Image: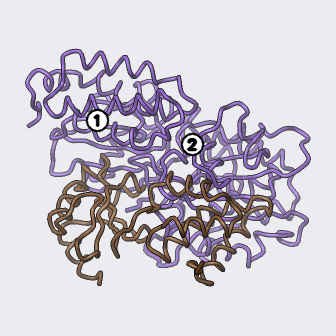
Chain colours: A purple, B brown
């Protein structure tokens, strides 16, 4: 279910219309107006970047890096091939917003990429789409063809000298490819193993060329910002958290789904929008930003506003905007066991601390869950975490450690009870 | 050696190749393996070698890709491969229940195929559709949402 409350990605989208994704519908909603204006008025690329900077738009994929600033990292005065890449490899457990963007409004992504190409001078782009949503990969290819036929993509866009080619590339089951440098390796036809940084992709990216990579929701926000203004976008959210955001709400709520709301909306309101707790049960905990984000107990969550700074202050992160809601029946040891298994399964195996450490984390949480925990296990988990975090090429190691730390910080008693009594506190 | 990839499959691979710079043909390997697997259900060593030959890559480089990404099958699978997500967000909304129901109904565990070769059951990781849990993929490409036991029965009935 997708619910538009207030925002920009799904503004005026009629989700019930069978072909609401098509170009005709998108144009009726004001789509491609920003592109037409910029091409007709030959607006300077620098001015486009300034507008995006003014919007306060921060990357919607998880890291929250300011988009406009990222675009300025391309080497100045570089002459030669530059690439633009959209990251739709959405596989962070709890996150399902980009899937809905491709389902209901793919042309916003396409127009956003074309505008970014204009601003950055990239002439070729790829949208890397999660293999598990293959039907939407096919639909995106159809949308690309629509845009090409309408003269918005390809050579000499709208009769100008501006050209941009866009292609879809699919993943095929590897969480790690959501990491931008692993994604580039994957497009190059290799195993998706992250690269050392620096150099960052803006300098050495796809095929060794300067490359800008942004998330799907980030690109989908660009047309609105340029159609209206950066300032208007900023005003929708909070300082340092400009605009609106899609939150994917899953777990124990009555109406799981995507909710597009202003950044800074209280969590309690979001929970209400999602129909409240399923079966009238009591809220126990919330993972506010995808499975890698540290869990927060109910009392902290209920006083939280959904924006970058507030969630960071509470000791977690906004991440991809995936809100996993858990009621009083959830055993935190069991919940962590499943998450730890995921990181163990998805570690690419390149760095020893992550390859081996994620297995250790999983096996220890597994034995605690199965009544074989030892009194020293909690210290051991903390120690293994310290030996993974910050010691790997990419952030997957940290992503595996953060949920463990969050659980031990807020629900340590449940782990201790499991170890001492060989059974669960919640039944 | 007989040609395993049909001319249709080769034409589809050509379409993938055209997306990338001519000197980076290997970028098409993920698409090519997907096309090959869709046609042959799983990727035998011979099929991997033929994809490698077609893309002018070393067979080991293609095998490396095929073995890295979870959705490629390097062993035979049933006519219908069913992948169920059991990750936390799905588990909170019946993902594990759906998987257990399938195990019991088909009489197989994860990674196994029914004796008649019809179904293979696989435990999947996040498919990016947690709001529609329980989620099941049929043959990698068809996503089925809200798979309660009743819906599973209905779906299995449709699969010949």
In the image, is A215 to the left or to the right of B106? right
**Residue at horizontal 47%, vertical 77%?**
A17
Quadrant placement of the N terminus of chain A:
bottom left
Q: Disc 1 marks which residue?
A: A336
Q: Residue at x 50, y 77 (%)?
A: B39
Q: Chain of mark 1?
A: A
How many neighbours does mark 1 have within 10 angstroms: few (below 14), some (14-19), or many (20 or more)?
many
Inspect this view and state whether residue A24 appears.
yes
Residue assigned mark 2 = A179
- Chain identifier of the residue bearing label 2 in the image: A
Tell me the crowding category of disc 2: few under 14, some 14 to 19, or many 20 or more residues within 10 angstroms, Cα based: some
Residue B148, given in percent of the width and then of the height, sits at 21, 66
Question: From the viewer's perspective, is residue A380 above or below residue A188?
Answer: above
Residue A364: x and y in percent read: 27, 28
Q: Quadrant of the C terminus of chain A?
A: top left
> A60 above or below A114?
above
Nearer to me, A347 or A225: A347
| Secondary-structure class at tag 2 | loop
> In which image quadrant can residue B3 be found?
bottom right
Look at the image and tell me whether residue A13 can be seen: no
**Of residues B29 and A51, the one drawn nearer to the viewer in this rendering:** B29
User: What is the x, y in percent for residue B33?
Assistant: 56, 66
Point out the tag, 2 or 1, that comes first from the N-terminus.
2
Spatial CA span between label 2 and label 1: 22 Å
Residue shown at 41% from the left, 56% from the top: B127
Horizontal arrangement in the rendering, residue B17 relative to residue A101 (left or right): right
Q: Secondary structure at mark 1?
A: helix
Residue B55 position by quadrant: bottom right
Looking at the image, residue A383 sits to the left or right of residue A348; the answer is left
User: In the orientation shown, which residue stands out farthest toward the front?
Assistant: B1
Residue B102 as seen in the image, left or right of residue B58: left
Q: Position of residue B48 (x, y in %)?
A: 56, 65
């Amino acid at each position: 279910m997708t619910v538009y409350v207030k925002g920009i990605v799904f503004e005026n989208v009629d989700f019930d219309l069978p072909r609401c994704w098509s170009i005709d519908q998108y144009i009726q909603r004001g789509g491609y107006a920003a592109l037409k204006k910029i091409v007709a008025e030959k607006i300077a690329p620098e001015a486009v970047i300034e507008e995006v900077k003014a919007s306060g738009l921060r990357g919607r994929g998880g890291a929250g890096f300011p988009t406009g600033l990222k675009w300025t990292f391309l080497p100045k005065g570089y002459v030669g091939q530059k690439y633009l890449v959209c990251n739709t490899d959405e596989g962070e457990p709890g996150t399902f917003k980009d899937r809905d963007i491709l389902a209901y409004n793919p042309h916003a992504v396409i127009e956003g990429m074309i505008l970014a190409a204009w601003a950055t001078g990239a002439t070729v782009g790829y949208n890397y789409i999660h293999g598990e949503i293959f039907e939407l990969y096919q639909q995106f290819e159809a949308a690309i063809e629509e845009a090409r036929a309408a003269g918005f993509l390809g050579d000499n866009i709208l009769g100008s000298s501006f050209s941009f080619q866009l292609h879809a590339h699919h993943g095929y089951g590897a969480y790690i490819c959501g990491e931008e440098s692993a994604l580039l390796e994957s497009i190059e036809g290799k195993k998706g193993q992250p690269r050392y940084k620096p150099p960052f992709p803006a300098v050495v990216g796809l095929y060794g060329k300067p490359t800008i990579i942004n998330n799907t929701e980030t690109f989908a926000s660009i047309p609105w910002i340029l159609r209206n203004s950066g300032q208007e976008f900023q005003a929708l959210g909070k300082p340092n958290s400009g605009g609106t955001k899609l939150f994917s709400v899953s777990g124990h709520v009555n109406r799981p789904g995507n909710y597009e709301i202003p950044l800074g909306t209280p969590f309690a309101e979001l929970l209400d929008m999602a129909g409240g707790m399923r079966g009238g049960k009591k809220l126990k905990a919330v993972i506010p930003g995808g499975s890698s984000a540290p869990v927060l107990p109910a009392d902290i969550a209920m006083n939280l506003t959904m924006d970058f700074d507030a969630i960071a202050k509470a000791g977690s992160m906004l991440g991809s905007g995936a809100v996993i809601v858990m009621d009083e029946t959830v055993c935190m040891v069991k919940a962590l066991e499943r998450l730890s298994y995921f990181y163990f399964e998805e570690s690419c195996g390149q760095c020893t601390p992550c390859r081996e450490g994620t297995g250790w984390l999983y096996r220890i949480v597994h034995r605690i869950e199965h009544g074989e925990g030892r009194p020293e296990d909690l210290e051991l988990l903390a120690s293994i975490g310290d030996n993974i975090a910050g010691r790997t090429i990419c952030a997957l190691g940290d992503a595996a450690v953060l949920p463990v730390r969050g659980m031990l910080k807020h629900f340590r008693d449940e782990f201790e009870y499991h170890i001492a009594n060989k059974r669960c506190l919640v039944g | 050696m007989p040609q395993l990839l049909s001319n249709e499959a080769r034409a589809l691979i050509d379409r993938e190749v055209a997306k990338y710079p001519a000197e980076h043909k290997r970028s098409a390997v993920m698409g090519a393996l997907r096309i090959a697997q869709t046609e042959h259900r799983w990727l035998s060593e011979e099929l991997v070698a033929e994809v490698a030959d077609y893309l002018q890559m070393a067979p080991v480089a293609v095998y490396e890709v095929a073995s890295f990404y979870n959705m490629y099958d390097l062993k035979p699978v049933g006519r219908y491969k069913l992948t169920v997500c059991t990750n936390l967000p799905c588990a909170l909304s019946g993902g594990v229940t759906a998987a257990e129901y399938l195990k019991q109904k088909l009489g197989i565990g994860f990674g196994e195929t029914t004796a008649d070769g019809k179904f293979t059951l696989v435990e999947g990781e996040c498919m990016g559709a947690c709001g529609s849990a329980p989620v099941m993929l049929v043959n990698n490409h068809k996503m089925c949402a809200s798979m309660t036991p009743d819906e599973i029965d209905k779906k299995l009935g449709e699969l010949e």
